[in-house]
Image: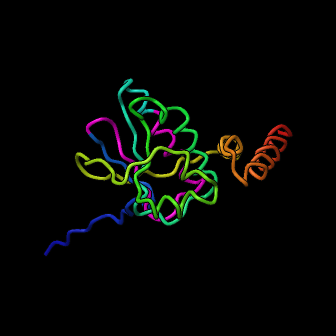
Amino acid sequence: MSVNVTPNVSPIISPLKIATTDSGCCIRVEGKGTMNESQAAREVALRTLDTSQTASVVFDLTACTYLDSTFLGCLLDLYKRCGRTAPPRFAVAASADQRKKLFSACGLDRVISHVDAAPPVRGEWIALPPESLNRQLLMRHVMECHRALAQVDTPMKVAFAKIADEIEKDLNKV
C-alpha cells in the first residue's frame, strides 16, 4: 500500500488579489489594506500603467474593511499620476457608501476617481504578497504617501504633513 504525501504548502495569505482586465489590471483589497501591502500594490499598478498609454488600473475596494493612511496616500499618488487623464487610467471601484466609509475622514471621497463596480476580469485572481522592504525603504514609502495626503485640502492636512516631516527627520539621521 502506498501513501500519497502532499508537501505542507501554505497558500499566500494576503488581502491583495490581482487579475487582468481588457485594459490592464484590477487589484482587489479584501479586508484591511495597510502600509504592509501598499508598496506591492503600488508597484503592480505602476508596472501596469507603464505598459502602454492606454493601460488602466482599478482598485476594487468592495470587500475592503479598512485602509490606513499609507494605503490611502498610495491610492492618492496613483490617482494624481494617472487618474486625471481623459479617460482616467486609474480609479477605485466601490459603492458610494463604501467610498464614504473608507475615504471621508481624509476627504478623498471627493478627490479620487471612482466607479461603482470593478471591470470584468480575465482568468483567476492571484494573491499578491506584500513586498519585503527594509526599514528605510518602507519608511520612505510611508513618508511619500503622507506627503501626498498633506497636499489635499482636508482637516487632516497638517497632521499628515507632521507625520511626513518626522519620518523625513528620522530618515536623514541614517
Q: Position of residue 23 (x, y in %)?
A: 30, 35
Q: How many marks do you count on the picture?
A: 0
Q: Residue at position x 52%, y 63% from top?
A: 32
Q: Is residue 136 left or right of residue 73?
A: right
Query: In the rendered view of the protein, which quadrant contains the N terminus?
Result: bottom left
Between 154 and 12, which is closer to the camera in this rendering?
154
Q: Quadrant of residue 54?
A: top left
Q: Is residue 52 above or below residue 38?
A: above
Please state if 148 lies on the left or on the right of 99 as rendered: right
Residue at 71%, 44% (x, y): give it: 150
Residue sitting nearer the eye, 69 or 20: 69
Q: Is residue 39 magenta?
A: yes
Query: Residue 66 sits in which quadrant?
Result: bottom right
* Image quadrant containing the C terminus: top right
Residue 171, position in %: x, y?
79, 40
Q: Residue at x 81, y 48 (%)?
A: 162
Is 145 covered by the magenta stretch?
A: no
**Which contiguous range is marked in magenta?**
22-46
- The answer to whether 46 is drawn above or below residue 3 in the figure is above
- Which residue is painted at 52% across and 39% down in the image? 79
